[in-house]
Amino acid sequence: MDRFHEMQVFLAVAEEQGFAAAARRLNTSPPSVTRAIAAMEQRIGTQLLARTTRSLHLTEAGQRYLEDCRRILAELDEAEEAAAGSYSIPCGHLAVTAPVLFGELFVAPVLGAYLDQFPLVNINALLVDRVVNMTDEGVDVAVRIGHLHDPGQQAIKVGEVRRVVCAAPGYLDQHGRPSRPEQLRDAKIVSASSSQLVSEWTFVDGRQPLTVPIEPRLVVTANNAAINLARLGWGMTRVLSYQVAAAVAAGELELVLETFEPEPLPIQVVFQKSSRVPAKVLTFVDFLAHRLGQDAALNPALKLRGC
């Protein structure tokens, strides 16, 4: 077994956190994975993985070796892609990440359209509500909601979203429409545990920040669940504007306290800065940015022009 293949096996075991899962990913048998790791550790002369009957984790040496493997394999892929002409022709594997709900609503439809146009590209979409380390996890393109802090990344702004408070019209008819954020202390609140807005909500009063402590009576694990409960009239919730755009347009939810909303957050399509960017990345970034830039739910100015 060559060393590059051993590195691929080690990478699969570390990322899948198990020999059987790594074997499934590599379409091979668990014993062959076990033999590869044992041969690697024997050749290197140190233990890379600490194993028990119930768990597996990287040793300190294994963690350093994992980072080196990722770098070496990425450079190998880049060299092969360059030799195959992928810097001029969109082809190969493309890894994309986006927040779960945003990805389902806005990114997933674009993926299919892009693949129809570029048949030599395959896409793996990682939809998760966390900030993915693009370098460590081998991601080519990311959709970020918020401001960037990594100078090694290049971004194209495609829209913006607001942090909105909403409830069903029936709930507001029964309990009243708040005119000031402080009145939310007496409201029935449902929040998502994945949100950073569980314990307090921040607003702007004039030019001054205004923070209101929130004590949700109900906390759920997903934004969709909180939104559905609000639609059913159970209480109020705070989410990003794109998440409830359709429900607001249909009259199922109503926005309140709009004059107290903080500044909108930018939506950006992000990729790594490099002297050579593969054609698959450039074409996908252009394709995605164009599609998202034309969506009125993400670009309020389009609504003003009647688009």
Image (cartoon, rainbow, N blue to C red):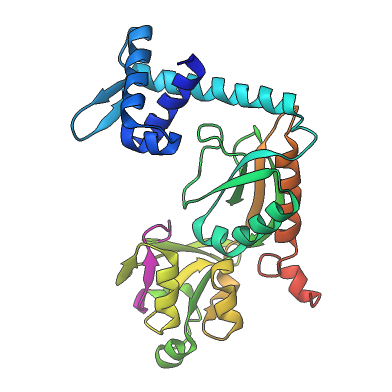
Question: Of residues 89 and 232, which is closer to you in this image?
Answer: 89
Q: Position of residue 22 (x, y in %)?
A: 38, 34
Report the residue at 52% width, 84% height from top.
Answer: 252
Q: Which residues are magenta?
A: 185-197
Q: Judge from the rendering whether residue 226 lies leftward or rightward of residue 152; answer left or right.
A: left
Quarter residue 214 falls in: bottom left
* Residue 52 is inside the magenta segment: no
**Quadrant of the frame with the N terminus:** top left
* Residue 187 is inside the magenta segment: yes
- Majority secondary structure of the magenta segment? loop
Report the residue at 58% width, 84% height from top.
Answer: 250
Report the residue at 49% width, 88% height from top.
Answer: 169
Can residue 2 be seen here? The reply is yes
Q: Position of residue 241 (x, y in %)?
A: 57, 68
Question: Of residues 261 and 165, which is closer to you in this image?
Answer: 165
User: In this rendering, is residue 8 above or below 289?
Assistant: above
Quarter residue 211 falls in: bottom left
